[in-house]
Amino acid sequence: LEQAYPQDCTEVFFIDGGSTDGTIAILEDYANRYPAIHLLNNPARFVPTAMNIGIRAASGEIIIRMDAHAGYPPDYVSQLVDWLQKTEADNVGGLWHTAPRTAQPKAEAIALALAHPFGVGNSLFRIGVEEPTEVDTVPFGCYRKSVFERFGYYDERLQRNQDIELNKRIRQLGGRILLIPHISCTYYARDTYKGLWRNNFQTGRWVVLTSWFTKNLSALSLRHFVPMAFVAYLLLLLVLGIGSLWGAVPPLFLAPALVPLLLHFLLCAYFSFTISRQEAKRQLFPYLFAAFWVLHLSYGSGSFSGFLELFRGKSRA
């Protein structure tokens, strides 16, 4: 409602997944006062189903996804629409600025780790670009409605990564996705390591399940699988360590195997130190160090768990 885009040209769809916290009553009150607001029900309770419900209900030519846990400046919608109309792109999006939910050092460190290449890889919408750039995916997105008729809707089997898979599909079929640095929204990150682990674990898990459901490894990028390789290495290192204690693995063989672990430790320390120095907050160092470890281990463990799920499913079949 605070967007600068004309309200008489706007439909706002809230797709509720069975909330019981009073959200529906609040939205119904707003809908009675603002004709542009529509409340729809999502019995499946999953994001891709909600998106498809909203897309099919929309009468306009442009679809903009705006998730919760994020803040949007007043010109967000108008900027996206302007860039979509003056380019031949099928989807445009802006940068994702990660902010802490609270002023606590732990929350600040988590947000900083989620915006750093060592934490999230080469995710351009997180780490930034200098000029409009063609990319594999953008956060949320602004699409022409015809895009869904040409390339298909959100895959409702995917509880996570459905936006990445859709954007990969668009690209593979000849579409264009633009990341615009002049546009941005603010994502409010988890403020505890437990919350970060749970969210990242599920994201990593669905990296594997997405590839399985779509039968398309290229639906995701190599960077999505690197944390799983690191977790697999740690498990192998554990086996070698136990073998060394029992005398089955020579100590000389174990020593070189520790090099990647030492390198990861040093990189975590280095980036934690440089970030805390840049922020002029030395107290952030231990929280950053822990945040990087949680990010890598949770994502990799989730991906490993996804593979185990598929293996058990095949075995039972």
Image (cartoon, rainbow, N blue to C red):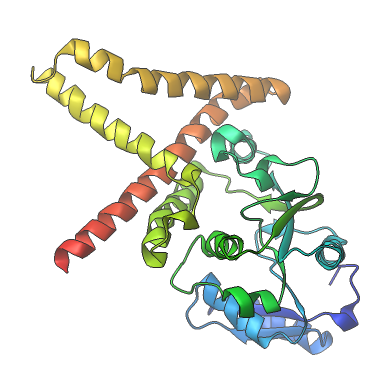
Residue 16 visible, this angle: no
Q: Residue 65: name its quadrant.
A: bottom right
Q: Is residue 126 above or below residue 250?
A: below
Q: Position of residue 171 (x, y in %)?
A: 60, 60
Residue at the spot x=40%, y=18% of the render? 262
Q: Position of residue 315 (x, y in %)?
A: 16, 62
Q: Among all residues in the image, which is located at the extreme left?
A: 247
Q: Among all residues in the image, which is located at the extreme front?
A: 174
Residue at the spot x=49%, y=83% of the render? 43
| In this picture, residue 251 sits left or right of residue 147 | left
Q: Is residue 65 above or below residue 200?
A: below
| In this picture, residue 238 sits left or right of residue 199 | left
Q: Among all residues in the image, which is located at the extreme top?
A: 252
Q: Is residue 50 above or below residue 188?
A: below
Residue at the spot x=84%, y=61% of the render? 83
| In this picture, residue 208 sits left or right of residue 181 | left
| In this picture, residue 247 sits left or right of residue 56 | left
Residue 258 visible, this angle: yes
Number of numbered discs: 0
Q: Position of residue 177 (x, y in %)?
A: 69, 58
Residue at the spot x=56%, y=40% of the render? 120
**Quarter placement of the N terminus:** bottom right
Q: Position of residue 24 (x, y in %)?
A: 64, 81
Q: Residue 144: name its quadrant.
A: bottom right
**Quarter placement of the C terminus:** bottom left
Front one among 178 and 9: 178
